[in-house]
Image: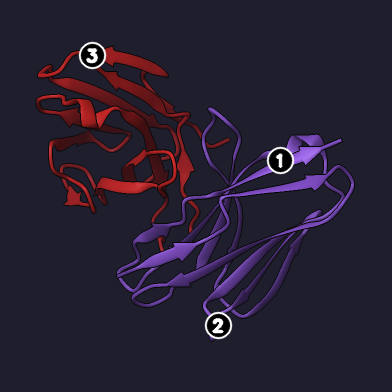
């Protein structure tokens, strides 16, 4: 069965800290995505990656960066955390034919920046 | 701009039928997805429509009209476990998923 694992379910950090969110998938998927989910808004794409060492900006990349050194792992980095980055962060992956393949999601990381 | 509209919240009774609507305005169309998301959990895939018409999967069905920019998710024989948020998402011309804010469905006994 498909499995996307996010390193933490809940995380509390302080303003200005550098924060790492990790995501691992065991399906040998080429495509991986990072979203944030806020009440009353749809999922918003932060960054995505179609291959190792490859990354593309999504709709809201400001304040974030990503790393994909291995196919199964996609990391989201908050360079200097701010309170407006308090949110639910969801990682997803999908196989080669991403046009019609559903995205498989991790359980999410609820991040609070104090 | 790109926009997906769906009702914020709906209430239905156990055993009944409910229809959740989704209208979209996007730059291009390459398919529409429905996901279910229970509180505090990951979204899970329900259906994918790329051609007009009705797709049925057990108690759940999804309909698409591309000319009207409209889809609905139909849930039959509602069960308490169907209480969740239902997310509509459209794949645009760049093959990016555009997400609606979700419809919270409350099932009452």
Q: x, y percentage for residue A103?
A: 46, 49
Chain letter, colour purple: B
As drawn, the label of residue A59 is: none
Residue under numbered circle 1: B106
**Would you place residue B82 above or below residue B96 in this image?**
above
Q: Nearer the viewer, residue A4 or B81?
A: B81
**Would you place residue A113 above or below residue B76 in this image?**
above
Q: Nearer the viewer, residue A46 or B105?
A: B105
Instruction: Identify the residue shown where x is 33% and y is 42%.
Output: A35
Chain letter, colour red: A
Residue under numbered circle 2: B68
| Badge 2 vs badge 3, beta-carbon distance below 8 Å | no
Horizontal side of residue B57 vs A58, given as left or right: right
Chain label for disc 3: A
Horizontal side of residue B52 vs B16, given as left or right: left
Mark 2 or 1, nearer chain start: 2
């Amino acid at each position: 069965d498909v499995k996307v694992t996010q390193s933490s379910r809940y995380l509390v950090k302080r303003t200005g800290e550098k924060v790492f969110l990790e995501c691992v998938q065991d399906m040998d998927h080429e495509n991986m995505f990072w979203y944030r989910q806020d009440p009353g808004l749809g999922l918003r794409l932060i960054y995505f990656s179609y291959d190792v060492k490859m990354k593309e900006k999504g709709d809201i990349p400001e304040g974030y960066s990503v790393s994909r050194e291995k196919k199964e792992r996609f990391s989201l980095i908050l360079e200097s955390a701010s309170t407006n980055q308090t949110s639910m962060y969801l990682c997803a992956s999908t196989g080669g034919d991403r046009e019609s393949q559903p995205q498989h999601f991790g359980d999410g990381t609820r991040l609070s920046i104090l | 701009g790109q926009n997906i509209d769906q009702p914020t919240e709906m209430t239905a009774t156990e055993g009944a039928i409910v229809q959740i609507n989704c209208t979209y305005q996007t730059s291009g169309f390459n398919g529409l997805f429905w996901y279910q998301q229970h509180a505090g959990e990951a979204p899970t895939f329900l259906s994918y429509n790329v051609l007009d018409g009705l797709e049925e999967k057990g108690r759940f069905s999804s309909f698409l009209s591309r000319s009207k920019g409209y889809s609905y998710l139909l849930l039959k024989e509602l069960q308490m476990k169907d209480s969740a948020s239902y997310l509509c998402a459209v794949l645009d011309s760049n093959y990016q998923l555009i997400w609606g804010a979700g419809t919270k469905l409350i099932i009452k006994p």
